[in-house]
Amino acid sequence: MKLSFRWYGQDDKVTLEQIRQIPGMEAIVTAVYDVPVGEVWSRESIGKLKELTEQAGLKFEVIESVPVHEDIKLGKPSRDQYIENYCENIRRLAEAGIRCICYNFMPVFDWTRTQLDHPLPDGSTSLVYYQEQVEQVDPLKSDSDLTLPGWDASYSREELRDVVAQYQSLTEEDLWANLKYFLEGIIPVAAECGVNMAIHQDDPCWSIFGLPRIITDEQNLDCFLKLVDDPHNGLTLCCGSLGCSAKNDVAKLAAKYAEMGRIHFVHLRNVQILPNGFEERAHLSSCGSLDMYAIVKALVENGFDGYVRPDHGRMIWGETGRAGYGLYDRALGAAYINGLFEAAEKECASHK
Ligand code: DNO
């Protein structure tokens, strides 16, 4: 595996110099943030990210995310232009050395939580999702001030209502058809450029705010991989997104899709499943519902050799910053991930 760390560019409070000092750190996961969703990224912006990353002694090989324009998800006539722009981004990123692109196909809202600073008993804070709070934080209601770091903040409330309304007549089948159309446009380009596309699961892995969500479970991941049956059409296996539903056996999915060679990127984090939702916890198996060692072992035993990153961390030691993306707890996560892989690799080698 190649250990990586998400970095939000020069505005990130976490610096490349800090990231480089995490043991075993190889690559940076980043994106161009100065371009509206759907537009072509400038070679200058891509080049700057590459230069900064490489100057810091890290590799520039993974992008998270190249976002997919809503018109593509909605299947509007303008999608062809947006798909062409997407292909151009793949080409430009490949030229700059990118090997893996993470993206998602969630209508309107990316990852969603109901509180970003929930205190845990040890005094740290973490991101949580409580069903009873979902109603209160409905982003379409005028008295809701919720905006989350993962959401496209460029929408006004009116625009948000409008785009959500456009989904009212869209069924899950339509969304699948639009995803297939998108993949048929981009995967041949990715294959030609040697880039692995890695779809992120919907987070949480169920429908929210009345919008369809389809990248949610084993059956749907099977369907997804068959839409375009090419190794460049693969997954970002996000343990926390799949693992917040007890119906997903993440270790089993890790084994299955790694064996098929379709996992290109892994987000490792633990969650505690609760009757009314879930809480993000420290990475350790004993802190949440997921058996992190079983997941890593499943990856190693099945020949996974892609990128891995610690996912959301708690806020600890008084750190403030971007929710889920502070330095300290993610660095602890990285150290733990190193340990899990070393143990799994040695155990696997001893059985050969
Ligand atoms: C949340 C992230 C997601 C992810 C996108 C991928 O912290 O895991 O925002 O980057 O869904 O497109």
Image (cartoon, helix red, strand yellow):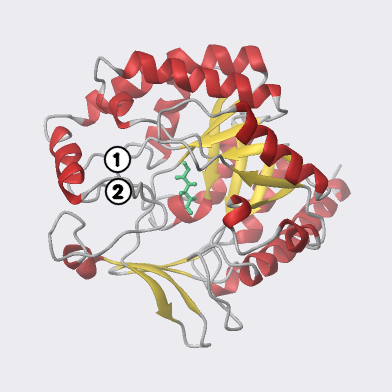
Badge 1 amino acid = Arg
Residue 182, image x and y in percent?
40, 19
Q: Which residue is at the front of the view, 34 or 284? A: 34
Q: Residue at x 24, y 19 (%)?
A: 76
Give left or right: position of 191 versus 306: left
Residue 148, image x and y in percent?
36, 58
Residue 149, image x and y in percent?
41, 57
| Residue 36 in view | yes
Vertical relation: 95 (above or below) 69: above
Q: Residue at x 29, y 17 (%)?
A: 78
* Res. 132 image quadrant: bottom left
Of the 4 image quadrants, the one containing the C terminus is top right
| Residue 305 in view | no
Q: Residue at x 47, y 22 (%)?
A: 86
Q: Residues within 10 Å of mark 1 (few under 14, many from 20)?
A: many
Q: Label 1 near label 2: C-beta < 8 Å?
A: yes
Give left or right: position of 253 versus 209: right
Residue 274, image x and y in percent?
35, 70
Label 2 element class: loop
Whether ligand 1 has any atom under 8 Å from the Cβ at mark 2 is answered as: no
Vertical relation: 312 (above or below) 111: below
Badge 2 amino acid = Trp
Q: Residues within 10 Å of mark 2 (few under 14, many from 20)?
A: some
Q: Which residue is at the front of the view, 339 or 327? A: 327
Q: Which residue is mark 2?
A: 206
Whether ligand 1 has any atom under 8 Å from the Cβ at mark 1 is answered as: no
Distance, label 2 to label 1, CA atoms, is 6 Å
Q: Residue furthest front?
A: 44
Vertical relation: 341 (above or below) 270: above
Q: Which residue is at the front of the view, 132 or 331? A: 331
Of the 4 image quadrants, the one containing the N terminus is top right
Q: Which residue is mark 1?
A: 213
